[in-house]
Amino acid sequence: MFWVVAGSVLSGVLVDGLTGRRFSRELWLGMVAPLAVVSLTWILTVRVYKANPARITSLMVGAFAGKLVFFGAYVVVAVAVLGLQPVPFAISLTGYFIALHLIEALLLKRLFV
């Protein structure tokens, strides 16, 4: 998981530099939630898999439901309360969400082999 965090932070630094730091808050807050969620989900998945692999499906279903609620609330708070610019925030959040969940899927595939 270290490489996932390091890669996310490095990409954030690069994009932040390329955009002249105009959208720093949007970029970093768009990254931090998907990174935290994927990291937590991965840690729980590995623990559950080692203890009882048959429980993975129920964990993933519960995690999916929790992610729906969390990300819905997160977007509302980020835009309505924190006043982030919606388009740069949405681009960052969507990009990191997709990339990090793809990495999580690849890690799951490797775990199950």
Image: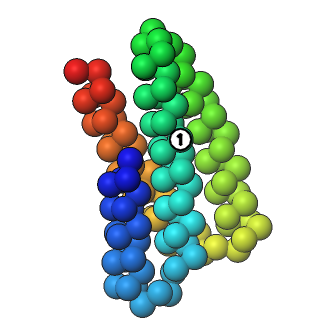
Q: Is residue 111 left or right of residue 94?
A: left
Q: Residue furthest top?
A: 54
Q: Residue at x 51, y 80 (%)?
A: 23
Residue 57 percent across, percent down from the top left: 47, 16
Q: Residue at x 59, y 39 (%)?
A: 67
Residue 30 percent across, percent down from the top left: 52, 63
Residue 56 in view here? no
Q: Is residue 112 left or right of residue 81?
A: left
Residue 53 percent across, percent down from the top left: 42, 13
From the image, which quarter does the C terminus lie in? top left
**Can you say whether 26 is above or below 103 in the image?**
below
**Can you say whether 84 is above or below 74 in the image?**
below
From the viewer's side, name the closer residue of 40 and 106. 40
Secondary structure under tag 1 reads helix
Q: Residue furthest right?
A: 81
Q: Which residue is mark 1?
A: 40
Residue 54 in view here? yes
Residue 68 percent across, percent down from the top left: 61, 38
Q: Residue at x 29, y 21 (%)?
A: 112
**Can you say whether 39 is above or below 21 in the image?**
above
**Residue 95 picture quarter:** bottom left
- Kind of residue at disc 1: Leu
**Mark 1: few/some/many CA within 10 Å (<14, 14-19, 20+):** few
What scheme was used to colour the molecule? rainbow
**Residue 107 picture quarter:** top left
